Image (tube, grey):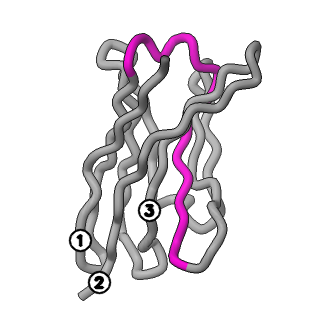
Amino acid sequence: QVQLVESGGGLVQPGGSLRLSCAASGSIFRFDVMGWSRQAPGKGRELVAQIISGGGTNYAESVKGRFTISRDNAKNTVYLQMNSLKPEDTAVYYCNAFVGGLSVDYWGQGTQVTVSS
């Protein structure tokens, strides 16, 4: 059973920074893709950033240049560094891990990020 636990959310002023963490139970080497998505009130879930096993990354246009996804294999953790935060970044942020060979996608419980003055 895979567990993903997000942390690091909170309230921040516009222009501020936060770093989200996603700790996996067990090695993250088994995951082909790990990523972060977000869901704002009244909106659908949208992909924010992904990191593949080879190290390549993908970002939503709305966060390019401001957010950075990274992974620490030794700590079985994926991070999302968020800089220059805007009110429209306010959402619940979810971590996911995808195993291609099994076509299984695991999700965490989410962490709230609120950007407001």
Q: Residue at x 41, y 51 (%)?
A: 110
Residue 86: quarter of image? bottom left
Q: CA distance from mark 2 to mark 3?
A: 14 Å
Answer with mark 2 or mark 1, whichever residue precedes in sequence: 1
Mark 1 residue crowding within 10 angstroms, few (<14) / some (14–19) / many (20+):
some
**Percent x, y of residue 27:** 43, 11
Mark 3 residue crowding within 10 angstroms, few (<14) / some (14–19) / many (20+):
some
Answer with mark 1 or mark 3, whichever residue precedes in sequence: 1
**Percent x, y of residue 57:** 60, 37
Residue 37 in the magenta stretch? The answer is yes
Q: CA distance from mark 2 to mark 1?
A: 7 Å
Mark 2 residue crowding within 10 angstroms, few (<14) / some (14–19) / many (20+):
some
Which contiguous range is marked in magenta?
Answer: 25-41
Task: Give the amino acid at mark 2.
Answer: Ser
Q: Residue at x 24, y 78 (%)?
A: 13
Q: Secondary structure at mark 2?
A: loop
Residue placed under numbered mark 3 in the picture: 92
Task: Give the amino acid at mark 1.
Answer: Leu
Give the answer, above or below, for where 10 lies relative to 96.
Answer: below
Q: Residue at x 45, y 47 (%)?
A: 68
**Percent x, y of residue 66:** 45, 61
Give the answer, above or below, for where 66 lies relative to 71.
Answer: below
Residue placed under numbered mark 2 in the picture: 116
